[in-house]
């Protein structure tokens, strides 16, 4: 059973920067796609970014493209979400997640079976 521990959330001013981290244990991290998702109050959980097991492929939601960057360090079993120039509409609980099987590349939350505890990010205007 994989465990995901997130850190780095909090309050940030619009136009600033913030980095979320997600440390994984209990599985061969380097063979799994990792994703970031978020959920704002009253809204469904939505895709933010995904990175393939080797780190060569990434995808982003249109709403964050050009501002957020996903990366991973397989030597540390950690995936990151670098949030540059966040906007108030980025305020949400952010979750990291690991894909349900090795070498699966997907942006659908249904293909992710293990989730972090969630980290609140609040962007002030």
Image: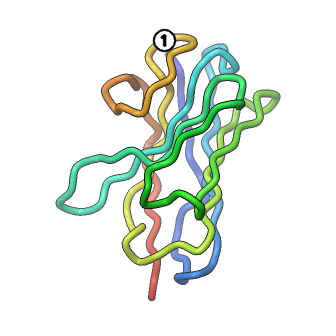
Q: How is the image coloured?
A: rainbow
Q: Which residue is mark 1?
A: 101
Q: How far across and down, in percent of the image, does residue 75 sit?
A: 82, 28
Residue drawn at 56 percent across, 31 percent down: 34
Residue drawn at 51 percent across, 37 percent down: 35
Give the vertical position of 32 relative to 74 (above or below): above
Residue drawn at 44 percent across, 50 percent down: 61
Give the vertical position of 89 relative to 99 (above or below): below
Q: Nearer the viewer, residue 35 or 75?
A: 35
Q: Residue furthest left?
A: 42
Q: How far across and down, in percent of the image, does residue 105 sit?
A: 51, 22
Write down the quadrant of residue 68 in the picture: bottom right
In-image side of 66 versus 63 (left or right): right
Q: Residue furthest bottom?
A: 125
Q: How far across and down, in percent of the image, does residue 88 sit?
A: 41, 77
Q: Does dot 1 land on a helix, a strand or a loop?
A: loop
Write down the quadrant of residue 120 in the picture: bottom left
Q: How many marks?
A: 1
Q: Residues within 10 Å of mark 1 (few under 14, many from 20)?
A: few
In-image side of 108 versus 78 (left or right): left
Give the vertical position of 11 relative to 124 (above or below): above
Quadrant that contains the C terminus: bottom left
Q: How far across and down, in percent of the image, does residue 95 sit?
A: 44, 45
């Amino acid at each position: 059973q994989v465990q995901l521990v997130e850190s780095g959330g909090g309050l940030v001013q619009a136009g600033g920067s913030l980095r979320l981290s997600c440390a994984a244990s209990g599985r061969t991290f380097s063979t799994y796609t990792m994703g970031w998702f978020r959920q704002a109050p009253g809204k469904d959980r939505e895709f933010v970014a995904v990175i393939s097991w080797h780190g060569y492929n990434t995808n982003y939601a249109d709403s964050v493209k050009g501002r957020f960057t996903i990366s991973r360090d397989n030597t540390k079993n950690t995936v990151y979400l670098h949030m540059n120039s966040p906007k108030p509409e980025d305020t949400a609980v952010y979750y990291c997640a690991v894909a349900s099987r090795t070498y699966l590349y997907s942006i659908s939350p249904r293909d992710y079976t293990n989730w972090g505890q969630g980290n609140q990010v609040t962007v002030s205007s």
